[in-house]
Amino acid sequence: MNSKMIIFTVASVVAAAAGAAAIPAAPFADNMVLQRGMRVPVWGTAQPGENVTVSFAGQTKCGTAGTDGRWRVDLDPMAASKEPRTLVIGERKIANVLVGEVWLASGQSNMEDPILSGNSRYRDGWGQTMTALARRSDPDLKMYFVQLAPFNRSWYDVQLAQARFAAEEKNAGMAVTCDLGNPYDIHPNAKEPVARRLALHALKDIYGFDDVIADSPTLKSSRVDEHGRFVLEFNDTTSWYGYTPNNAAPDGFEIAGEDGVFHPARIANQLIEKGRKGKMYEGRELIVASDKVKAPKRLRYLYSKPWVGSLYVGDSGLPLGPFEVTIAK
């Protein structure tokens, strides 16, 4: 092989390597979804000055990497499509790409680290930080999150703080998961119910399904009746049912009197149906009582081990999450 041939071969290899250097950013991978109805940015890195071609759904867009190696092109708005298509970025092919709704989901076990100091730090620190970050990019951005599920320790204070954040932040929604925890795994395996509960918020708030009940019940009012029982009224509630694996009555309620000592309490509503699938209770209100507390002042739910909820709203099927109430003196 003569020297000219060697030089030509080396030059060809270098050119080929440069042409294949366009690297899409991490979100661009097989089985992805592109956002419908708006311009779609596609970006990544390449050799500085390299021309990058992006093709998808009959569109072809070209861009050039800057001196820092970054490039971006924008695809024109597209209608939703469930047809699997290929997104071509330079020499790379990304398969099974759909066009529809894109939601950003995030989560990691170490995300709990800055929020375990109690309610005020969670609400005033994490909550305000999340709100500020969201508002910086979009003042109307919706934030849907998952309340911590039961594990082998109590999350009670953090769960209450999460519930307060969801109640106070108009664009936030929370999926209650007190019935889905795993005492042996901080990442419960029951992902589908969590996804469904988050999707309810999107359907109601974003897509106009006004009849959807997206929120788990939240306390509306409380009082103590003439029999010394707590009478609790909740939002988003029409009826109640309890379900436990052994078909026992739902537990988790505790009541205290003036002495502040809590005792286990029971649901005192009239039981109207009992079967293999659970217990149906009469009335929209919950009546909770303890034979050991004649003059109740405080009530809490899911404060004590095992912290697992088993009480649901009859029509929505959403669980009642941790809460507490104190009767004013």
Image (spheres, helix red, strand yellow):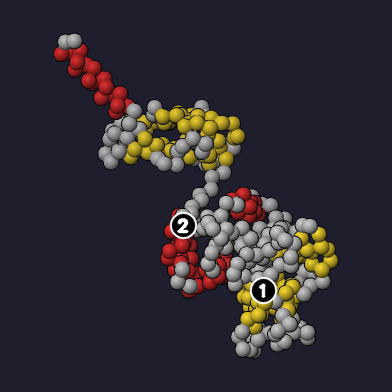
Rendering coords of residue 13 (x, y %): 27, 22
269 horizontally vs 33: left or right? right
117 horizontally vs 319: left or right? left
Q: Residues within 10 Å of mark 2 (few under 14, many from 20)?
A: few
Between discs 2 and 1, the one toward the N terminus = 2
Rendering coords of residue 2 (x, y %): 16, 10
Q: Amino acid at mark 1?
A: Phe
Q: Quadrant of the C terminus?
A: bottom right
Examine the rendering and report whether any part of residue 72 can be seen: no
Q: Residues within 10 Å of mark 1 (few under 14, many from 20)?
A: many
Q: Residue at x 59, y 37 (%)?
A: 80
Residue 44 to residue 213: above or below = above
Rendering coords of residue 197 (x, y %): 63, 55
Say what secondary structure mark 2 lies in.
helix
Residue 274 to residue 219: above or below = above
Q: Residue at x 63, y 89 (%)?
A: 258
Name the disc covering residue 253, or none. 1
57 horizontally vs 259: left or right? left
Name the disc covering residue 109, or none. 2
Rendering coords of residue 4 (x, y %): 17, 13
